[in-house]
Amino acid sequence: MRLSWPMAAARVVMSAPAASHTSAIALMKEILVARNAFAETLTSSAVARSVETQGAGLVRRIGP
């Protein structure tokens, strides 16, 4: 059986992204963080309205 070694053309060479790519990646990350925060706010608001509308049930205080 003959062993095969990867050819030079088949190797992947990783280089640092260009400045424009770095800026684009940073912007995408900022948008993702903002989108997640907005979604969390909407979810929290919906839960608060649900509790306000339907009630939270009886809350029993334990202790002095």
Image (spheres, rainbow, N blue to C red):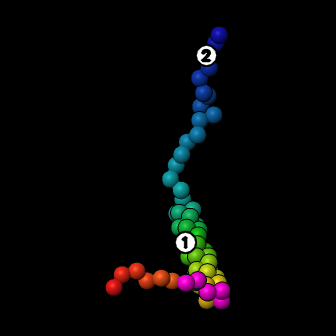
Q: Position of residue 30 (x, y in %)?
A: 54, 72
Residue placed at 59% from the left, 31% from the top? 8
Badge 1 is on which residue?
A: 33
Q: Nearer the viewer, residue 55 or 45?
A: 55
Magenta residue check for 42: no
Q: Which residues are magenta?
A: 53-58
User: Could one spot residue 23 in this view of the protein?
Assistant: no
> Horizontal and vertical percent for residue 6?
60, 27
| Dot 2 crowding, Cα within 10 Å, few <14, some 14–19, many 20+ | few
Residue displayed at 62% across by 78% down: 43
> Is any atom of residue 40 visible in this view?
yes
In the image, farthest residue toward the bottom: 53
Q: Residue 4 at x, y = what percent? A: 62, 20
Considering depth in this image, is 49 or 8 the residue closer to the camera? 49
Q: Is residue 55 rendered magenta in the image? A: yes
Please tell me which residue is depicted at 59% across the width and 35% down the height of the picture: 11
Please tell me whether residue 20 is drawn above or below residue 4 in the rendered image: below
Q: Amino acid at mark 2?
A: Leu
Q: Nearer the viewer, residue 39 or 48?
A: 48
Which mark, by number, is residue 3?
Answer: 2
Magenta stretch, main secondary structure class = loop
